[in-house]
Amino acid sequence: MTTYVLETNKVTKRFGGLEALKEVDLQVREGAIHSIIGPNGAGKTTFFNCVTGFYQPEEGDILLRGRLLNGLSPDRVTRLGIARTYQNIRLFKNMTAVENILVGMHCHLKTGLVGGIVRPPRTMREEKEAVEEAVRLLRFMGLEGMGDMMAMNLPYGLQRRLEIARALASKPTLLLLDEPTAGMNPKETQDMVALIRRLRDELGITILLIEHQMRVVMSISELITVLDYGAKICEGPPAAVQCDAKVIEAYLGKGSVQDALQAVAAQSAPSASPPAS
Amino acid sequence: MTTQSSDGWKQIVRNGLIGGAIVVLLSLVGMVVAFGQRYIVSGLFTMGHVLMLAPLLLLAYTTARRADGASVGSRLWLGGVSGLIGGAVVAVLVLIGHVVNLRAVLVSASPDLYQMLRFGVPLPLGALIPPLAGLLAGVAGGALALIPPRYRNVALQPILILLLLGLLRDLLVTMMLNWGVVGYLFRWMFAAAGMSVIGAIFVLVVFGGLAFWRAWRTPAVQRQRSPRQQMVIRVVSIVVIIVVLVFLPRILGTFFSEILDNVGLFVLMGLGLNIVVGLAGLLDMGYVAFYAIGAYVMGVLTSPELGFFSLPYWLALPVALVGAMLAGVLLGLPVLKMRGDYLAIVTLGFGEIVRLVVGSDWLRPFLGGSQGIQLIAQPRIGPILLNTQQELYYLILIGCLLAAFIAWRLKDSRVGRAWMAVREDEDVAQAMGINTVTTKLMAFAMGALFAGLSGTIFAAKLQSTYPHSFNVLVSINVLSLVIIGGMGSMPGVVVGALVLMGLPELLREFAEFRYLVYGALLVVMMLIRPEGLWPEARRKLELREAREA
């Protein structure tokens, strides 16, 4: 049996009468870049919310390296090694970039109320090391020298990067990225794709991402899971998924499946690069 | 061009009418008359006159400033017309008051008021006086708009300082009278009420010159100081402030020390609430509860009247503080899931519950009911009993310094960052691994700690405690002073407490209009200076950047 970082068994989440997730099974392999795609409202972000403990699923299990996550609060889940970013950037706007990252490190720091007031040498050392680490993270994410800027005053693309840096600060083994290239121009998108690869290759972090830009998804993912109306309809490597009839139907509607298939194939042909290994 | 000028006219008329309406309001609530005896410059003009003319001047100033590209003459003219319209509104009030007896409905519409609004000129001619005064104020406002921004302070600063000195005459003279040369100078500068004419001229010249010199020098000398210089300046100013603080009650005397003590108690509470509201973003409207708990625990533990314990102050103090903190946690537990306005309502209720419980007949044997608790112990250090305002001041001062130190340290620590993160976005804070439950409870507990300390000193100062001292207005006062001072800013708390708690005590006329002024001040602050009087450095930055963006 292969080791899975994240494994979900028949996860179901209901909001009143609406089934946002229907018995979703998903396995994320160690060291993979795994994408979840699907039309709007397919339940992708809901799935993220269930994994991070923000929602509790009605049925099904969520396991992180075999450890059951059900019932744990989001802060506990983060401490176990899952970090995430948000579709609509949710930085602490009125805090500086470094402070944002330091908040991300929260669970690895120990200073409490008394320590914060008295500031014994241990605390001072811890703070100093934390700030150094934060500066290193900023550099890694290409945000060098912007540590003292208010998060809200950073340009959009850099805010996305800062959000990832903040997530990395909690030293995750699994990173959930919710549309990391949303609203970016082609150049920024390209940089982000390279960056995501570096996160996996250099830091060894397993990555699960939601993405809408097909070009990004197809080029970066090793495995793609497709959700539609809360249910998993397809899973496989990019080449297989983009030719799957159900997937095309989900995106384009019933009827012109054949036409659409040809269209998709024609469109993605020039950029169909082999997935990174 | 024509549409622009018609818009311009609308603006002028509107500003004039607003100015006039403000003056009429201030007149009819009685402020103008009440301040009519508070001389700024002896025998020349009073705070009442300032209230009559300042609104017209300010609105004329805005009118003239908005008129982009207008010539010098037309700006003066615009301001003048706006002031004239405002004055005309006042004149209408005077005329109506002459024909109809407004006093039956509006108590403050007294002959004294009309007399003041007419500047003492009898009626047929007197009706022309307010428009004339408005015209002059308006032209002055227009002239102010003409001064280039850099030099505007040269005109404004000396006038504001003159106002402040005139208003605080009693305090300053009492303080400085016995200070040799300074006392002599002060006797020369101040009259029996307000400043002497010669003193006023002196102040205008000296501070005007100073302001001019500063404005003129700025571009030439780079204001950039090296970190070392900044450090030296900071250390020196802290030392000076501490020395002044230590000797303040000696300088001020008993009466003003009493005011100072009250301000200090509110500073202490403000520092605590600043953590809860300013840092952690938890809108607590029942803050008075912890003040009450501090005072009542002190009362129950030390008063021989109730006959449980007769502990000394210092032994009861830790119990009271722990009690207040526990109460903070207890309040925090049920409201953990609440945010914003819901939290405000629940905490408001909590504050009222505590007040009603301590005043209830049911708990009378333990807490004294509406009669309260008397004979509360006062702190004793060795042979010295701290029982006068001047002695208790030091206890309050130490409490404030300690609270400020704690708040300052915490703000820039792991816990402080967690508080800010919760304030910014609670869900994300939790997703970043912050335990929001303990984080919020810590904020409530720290806030309660400072309020509890304040309460114990309050009880010891009065040697008694009554339920009616702990009504919701205390919570509102503390919240207002935090907001007006500048959310999250510690110097702001001090400034806010001085303005909201100190000024009304110094100017007895204010007391009556306290809440009117509060309300107006809050509205005006939110409109023109949302960051507060002395904003936190970061917040100033962020609001300014947001405005520029």
Image (cartoon, coloured by chain):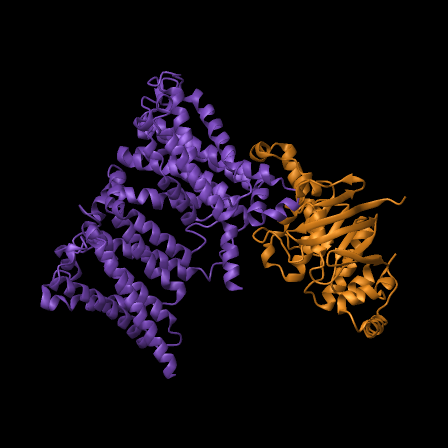
Chain colours: A orange, B purple
Q: Quadrant of residue B73?
A: bottom left
Residue B278 x, y percent position in the rendering: 49, 45
Q: Position of residue B514 (x, y in %)?
A: 29, 47
B489 or A13, nearer to the observer: A13
B457 w.r.t. B380: above or below = below
Residue in front for this viewpoint, B242 or B356: B356
- Identify the residue shown where x is 60% and y is 51%: A92
Quadrant of image for the N terminus of chain B:
bottom left
* The one of B148 and A153 positioned closer to us in this rendering: A153
- Vertical relation: B334 (above or below) B164: above
Which residue is at 38% across, 59% downward?
B213
Residue B397 visible in the snapshot = no
Which image quadrant: the C terminus of chain B? bottom right
Q: Residue B134 falls in which quadrant of the image?
A: bottom left
Image side of residue A218 versus residue A58, left or right: right
Establish if A269 lies above or below B281. below
Q: Is residue B108 toward the left or the right of residue A111 in the image?
A: left
Identify the residue at image location x=34%, y=72%.
B11
Is residue B26 found left or right of A167 in the rendered image? left
Q: How many marks?
A: 0
User: Which residue ends up furthest to the right in the rendered image?
Assistant: A1
Percent x, y of residue B460: 35, 26
Visible residue check, residue B274: yes
**As drawn, which residue projects farthest toward the front?**
A17
Residue A29 as seen in the image, left or right of residue A166:
right
Q: Position of residue B257 (x, y in %)?
A: 31, 34
